[in-house]
Image (cartoon, rainbow, N blue to C red):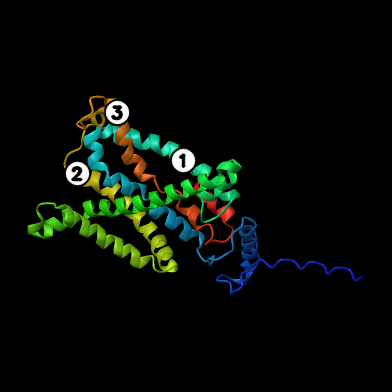
Amino acid sequence: MAPPEAEKPVDHTLNRRPSVSKGENTEISNDAARLMAMGYQPQMRRDISTLQLIGVAFMVTASWLGVLGGFTTGVVVGGSVCLIYGLIIVGVFSTFFAITLGELASAMPTAGGQYYWVSVLAPKKLSRPSAFFTGLCNLAGGVVATAGSSVLLGNMVYPYLSRLIVSMSEIHAWQNWLIGLAFNWTACSVNMSKKTVARTLSVGMFISIAVVIGLVISIPATSPKHTDAKFIFTSNENVSGWSSDVMAFLVDLINASYSFGIIDTAVHLAEDITNPENKANLLR
């Protein structure tokens, strides 16, 4: 009887021309093999650079924009104390959360992210329902975050439009909805192409940083009056309707949490970059 043929080694390279240089072919092959070992068939082109990954994560989170959008609500609910110390508290806990995400993304770099990790780490009997529930929550969070961003941008743009158009002196819900819808369609047009959105957000990262630096310098320098530091760091303006200042402070933490609510963005790009187990640690 003839000896059985030796098993052919599995070729994990992608069945198409790689979208990066020749020197990274081995890296792509390793990434594809790692993904297949986790039960996934490679589908995405790994053509997002490290800078573009950072740009996407930075711009989608945009914590300073979240603070700016919820500034008025924060002042009314709990005053400057809640804005300052609440942001610090949420920032510390969000850092712990980001470190955990970095560890899990380094061990299991998939675009699915949380739902895949739950399916692996949960007890066998609870694996599937837990993964389904986690994925459902992740999807709902993305929908709510997108809608919230549109409303936030609409609220920020509306005052400027009302100055230009006299008839818009009174805010109506349908007007704000139309502005948010315009932002949604603009974002949709950019997201039609992965290369376009990656390049746009990497450039937008530098624009965002420049705007923050400009605001931090220009506003204090041009302001005719400056509030006392004691008022900023110790005053508590609770007109939220809650009799307890502690409850008002806890409610106001929602504004700070909104600023750090989408820090898992880089995780879901794990199948669009080379060597994701190392680059995913940029979350830290």
What SS does tag 2 mark?
loop
Tell me where residue 127 appears, x and y as whole percent.
Answer: 56, 45
Amino acid at circle 1 = Thr
Q: Earlier in the sequence, mark 2 or mark 1?
A: 1
Q: Is residue 233 visible?
A: no
Between residues 100 and 54, which one lies in front from this camera angle? 100
Residue with the mark numbered 1: 95
Q: Which mark is nearer the camera, 2 or 1?
A: 1
Give the numbered dot on residue 223: 2
Circle 3 SS class: helix
Say whether marks 3 and 2 touch (CB < 8 Å).
no
In front of the other: label 3 or label 1?
Answer: 3
Q: Earlier in the sequence, mark 3 or mark 2?
A: 2
Crowd class of label 3 (few under 14; some 14 to 19; many from 20; radius 10 Å): some
> What is the x, y in percent for residue 120?
59, 46
Which residue appears at 36% of the width and 47% of the height? 63
Q: Residue at image x 24%, y 43%?
A: 220
Name which residue type carries label 3. Answer: Met
Residue 247 got which mark? 3
Mark 2 and mark 1: Cα distance apart in space: 33 Å
The single residue placed furthest to the right in the displayed view is 1
Residues packed near mark 1 inside 10 Å, few (<14), some (14 to 19) or many (20 plus): some
> From mark 3 to mark 1, how far is it between C-alphas?
24 Å
Please name whichever residue, 51 or 158, is drawn nearer the observer in this view of the structure.
Answer: 158
Amino acid at dot 2: Ser
User: In the displayed image of the protein, which residue is found farthest to the bottom?
Assistant: 17
Residue 118 picture location, percent across and down? 54, 45
Could you say which is closer to the camera, residue 125 or residue 12?
125
Q: Is residue 136 above or below residue 164?
A: above
